[in-house]
Amino acid sequence: MTNLFSKMIRVGIKTSPLQAILLFVNQAIAKFFQPKWESYLYVILPHPTEAKILMLSERGSYFLPHVRVNKSIDYANFITIKSEIEPELGF
């Protein structure tokens, strides 16, 4: 604990021992309870010959085909998006 407190003093942060303890506890909690990322990938699939797109329906509502992935995916990473969507939606 004194190590954390001495680091804070070296960088010029004025703090009390109680503030150093609270900072340490907050960092420990954040380390063990990091938020989980979720990505929702929606797909627009055009019909090959007509001006239509694929829509799914459930209980009277229509929506685009989509997949929920339990990680962060960059929208520009098409290969990763494709590899997540194809097996889930059966394309």
Image: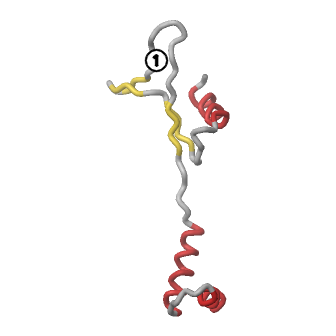
Percent position of residue 5, x then y:
60, 89
Please tell me whether residue 48 is drawn above or below residue 70 in the rendered image.
above
Q: Quadrant of the C terminus?
A: top right
Please tell me whether residue 7 is drawn above or below residue 71 in the rendered image.
below
Q: Residue at x 52, y 40 (%)?
A: 68
The number of numbered badges drawn on the structure is 1
Percent position of residue 51, x then y:
45, 11
Please tell me whether residue 91 is drawn above or below residue 3 in the rendered image.
above
Density class for disc 1 (Cα within 10 Å; few <14, some 14-19, many ≥20) is few
Q: Quadrant of the N terminus?
A: bottom right
Please tell me whether residue 22 is drawn above or below residue 2 in the rendered image.
above
Position of 12 compared to 51: left or right? right
- Which residue was labeled with disc 1? 53
Q: Residue at x 55, y 86 (%)?
A: 13
Report helix, strand or loop for mark 1.
loop
Percent position of residue 65, x then y:
48, 28
Which residue is at the far front? 12
Corner quadrant of residue 52 = top left
